[in-house]
């Protein structure tokens, strides 16, 4: 939560490394890289008018 991953925040998957790890997410105006094993703990849901790769906590 200290990184900005709080309920109601918009989260967008931006990049992933060639091997798929780490993955970069855009949240609250910041890009944050997370290892796949950490990213799997995020619970995302679709936005009301969602685009590809975008979710909401």
Image: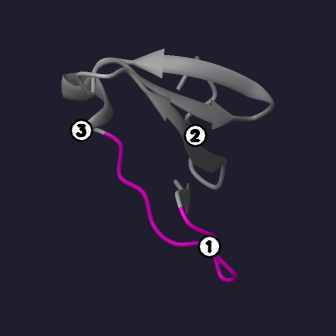
The label shown at residue 47 is 1
> In x, y percent, where is residue 1?
52, 26
- The colour mode here is one colour
> In x, y percent, where is residue 43?
35, 52
Question: Residue pushed farthest left?
Answer: 37
Near mark 1 (Cα within 10 A), the count class, few <14, some 14-19 or many ≥20, is some
Give the quadrant of residue 14: top right
> In x, y percent, where is residue 8?
64, 55
- Of residue 31 and residue 20, the one placed in the foreground of this image is 20
User: Relative to residue 28, is residue 19 depicted above or below?
Assistant: above
Residue 41 is left or right of residue 55, and the answer is left
Label whose residue precedes the other's in the sequence (1 or 2): 2
Q: Which residues are magenta?
A: 42-52
Q: Secondary structure at mark 3?
A: loop
The label shown at residue 6 is 2
Label whose residue precedes the other's in the sequence (3 or 1): 3
In this figure, which residue is indicated by the disc labeled 3? 40
Q: Nearer the viewer, mark 2 or mark 3?
A: 3
Question: Image point 65% across, 82% down: which residue?
Answer: 48
Give the quadrant of residue 50: bottom right
Query: Distance between the Cα atoms at labels 2 and 3?
Result: 15 Å
> In x, y percent, where is residue 5?
55, 34
Question: Image point 66% across, 35% down: which residue?
Answer: 27
The label shown at residue 39 is none
Query: Distance between the Cα atoms at labels 1 and 2?
Result: 15 Å
45 drawn magenta? yes
Question: Residue pushed farthest front?
Answer: 18
Q: Secondary structure at mark 1?
A: loop
Near mark 2 (Cα within 10 A), the count class, few <14, some 14-19 or many ≥20, is some
Residue 26 is left or right of residue 32, and the answer is right
């Amino acid at each position: 939560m200290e990184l900005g991953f709080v309920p109601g925040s918009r989260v967008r998957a931006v990049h992933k490394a060639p091997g798929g790890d780490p993955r970069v997410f855009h949240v609250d105006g910041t890009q944050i890289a997370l290892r796949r094993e950490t990213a799997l703990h995020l619970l995302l849901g679709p936005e009301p008018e969602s685009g590809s790769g975008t979710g909401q906590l």
